[in-house]
Image (cartoon, coloured by chain):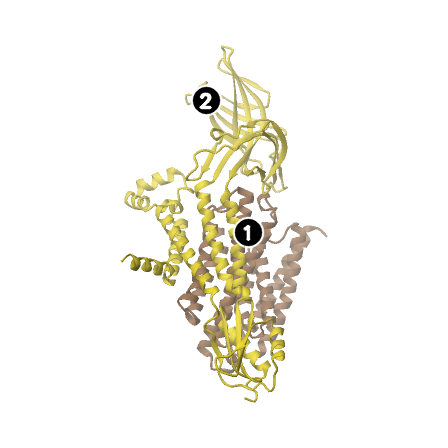
Amino acid sequence: MDNLLMLKYEVILHWIAVVFYILATVFFAYSVSFQKERGIKPAMIITLIGLLFHSCALGIRWWVTGHGPYMMKYEILSSNAWVVIVMFLIVAWRYTKLRPTGVVVVPLSFLMMTIGLFMNPEIKKLPPSLKGIWLVIHVTFNHMAVGALIIALGTSVLYILKEKKGDTDFFRKFPSLKVLDAYSYKFVGFGFIFWSITLVAGAIWANQAWGRYWGWDPIETWSLITWLLYGLYLHSRLFLKWKGKKAAWMLVLCFIVSMMTIYFIPFTIRSLHTAYF
Amino acid sequence: MFIRSRQKTKRFFTSPKTVILLIVITIIACLLGVLIPQVTDKSPLYFEAWREKSPYTFALVEFLQLNRVYTSFWFFILIALVLVTLGYSIYLLVKRNLRQDRGYSAQSTEVFRTGGETVDKIKRIFKKRRYRLTGRGEGETEGEQELVFAKNSIGRWGSVVFHSGIFIIIVSAIVTFSFQKRGFVQIMEGEVFSGRNSDFLVKDLGLFVKTFDAGFKTHLSRFRHTYWDTGAIKSLQSSVVVIKNNKDTEHNVSINSPLDINGVKVYQSSNYGYVLSFLFKESTGEEVMTRFLLDKPDRLGKPAIGRSAFPDTGYMLYMKFYPDITRPSFYPSKPILYLLDAEKGKEVFRGLLMPGQAVKIKKDILQFAAIRNWSGLIFARDIGTNIAYIGFVITIIGMIIMYFFPYKSIRLTMVGDSIISIKGITKRYHAIFGEEVNNIKAELGVGMDG
């Protein structure tokens, strides 16, 4: 089968996955908005089916391009959405009470995918500076950081919702406010580790490619700002006893900055990373 | 007086507010660095234009060194403060960790009957949850027995390890800033680079470094550049001969695969291009040989462009070099040069030249002698890099210990077969730990018939 036809199938599979994710979002939203528990299970199943199509699409892409899906906005957004969904399913399987976080995680993932699908899906070959294991580590951990932070955001949103409407049966089945808050903290902690590994892998890779591990490139600096912000969040919890609602809102701010760092700054500012996209 | 001020200083550096404040200031400093144009990113002309347009704003920016944030005096003070605070924090954390466990929060204070649970059975329940019995002894009052179970004991040291890693990374940055040696050179195929300080084209030396001698010569035998069918670069590789102590060794340097010669690393730069050689024969019979280095064209099908004065002749050459006249290519297989020669602003020649071809310009003869490749190589020696790598590893290990393996300890007080209290302590995720303690209580059967 020729590559062009394969890529056509790949785009179709991507769109099918988007449709499933949208459907799952509807079920999650129905469940949380109308406080009906029966919507959660179908939402999980539909997300899983969407993931299967998504995996096939990414697999085809990988096969055709000859490299992992980490070049160009299209591939990065799609693979990031995939990692987020996989992480969410693992968390939802391990901690069943956190399944309603899907109301935040799944729509954000399909949003990423859809934005990617509207971007140029052309195949770009890897420039020599991007060949190597450190790129794979850098991108993979960055995706995992986004996944952990989106799940943390999900638990924070559940916290805010439960605090407002906590006296209903549906919300009573959620973990307690304190536990939700602790989960937010836990996932931010994981995100912080993954973000740090992203920074470190990027530094080692930069040193191999350009002979310096830090150059105050705008993307590098924004990445450091994000890392410091999460550090501030973690220290505020520890020292200033910022918990609950205050911590949840701070997490929302941190999340916005991290998304800006990953998806806005590299596309708008000229830097060493520009060649990558 | 002195003791009081010393205590005050100590309190300042160990205060949580100071830590928070320093993180906030560092964030602001970084934001200034990305929002205000920096001297390292923009040309001097940009700053001249800025000075002319808004002299007062520019004067303020210059005074506060906001256009060179990361090398400004205040940024150094900030980094120094961060280092001192980190050092103090690490010291305090170590001191605290060396002490015995304190501050067990009561997860349960009621008297429970375990229904005849033996210590062995309790141990089994804890073992299943990967808790180890770390302490056993008499309780506070007579007849009481205490059992202490702990999990992830290493988790107590996570914060120390993490902060030590950050400390080392900052030290490495200071070492790099002070002692790094970096130099860029353009070497033509067949040419030998002496490795001497004066022969580098561009240098980036640390604060306390005056010169950079590589300590060996480098001969570029061949430079290979290959491309994908889209015109994007596929690979760049310089085949070099390193000449050290009259010994020649052959090596290949490519992007992401630097060469290490006794601590001096040689990196393949992404800068490269063509060298055009010209022979100028004056009417007097005197010959001048000159080379011009042109950068590789931005895109496939575009020419490599250059403009330069021809030394000792008064001529100015404007060059457009096409590597292949028959098709868009970066390989000089059928090259041609579009040349415009001017003297005192007046055109004296315009035309196409092939390699080997000569043209008469007034009474002189200019020959397009040869084409070769040039390769950009970066030579660097930085001991800070190794220190940074150690810091990276320690930081990541510290974080993993901190967040994946939080320290947990549970103290059971028993009288006979009855548990009279269960108290737990953890460093992180207290509410989740509370749930775990409740589950353990349920498993132990406490409270069931108490």
Q: Is residue B82 left or right of residue A60?
A: left
Q: Check the picture and name the quadrant holding the C terminus of chain B.
A: bottom right
* Residue identified by numbered label 2: B342
> Which residue is found at the position 39% from the left and 51% from the top?
B80
* Whether residue A74 can be seen here: no
Q: Colour of chain B?
A: yellow
Picture colour for chain A: brown
Query: How far apart are the alpha carbons under marks 2 and 1?
Result: 52 Å
Residue B23: x %, y % from top left: 40, 57
- Kindly indicate whether the residue at mark 1 contacts the one at mark 2 (C-beta within 8 angstroms): no
Instruction: Please report the residue visible at 45 percent of the width from the left and 18 percent of the height from the top.
Output: B312
Identify which amino acid the numbered label 2 is placed on.
Ala
Viewer-side residue, B220 vs B259: B259
Badge 1 amino acid: Ala
Residue at numbered disc 1: A201
- Image quadrant containing the N terminus of chain B: bottom left
Location of residue B232 in the rendering, given as x and y in whole percent from the top left corner:
59, 42
Residue A266 appears at what percent x and percent y?
Answer: 49, 51
Quadrant of the image occupied by residue A76? bottom right
Question: Do callouts 2 and 1 point to residues on the same chain?
Answer: no
Above-or-below relation of B252 to A204: above
Quarter of the image where one finds residue A24: bottom right
**Badge count:** 2
Q: Residue furthest top?
A: B284
Q: Chain of mark 1?
A: A
Task: Report the chain holding disc 2.
Answer: B
B5 shown above or below A129: below
Q: Give SS at disc 1.
A: helix
Residue shown at the point (43%, 34%) measured from the top left: B210
- Residue B163 vs residue B232, the one in the foreground: B163
B356, B126: nearer the viewer: B126
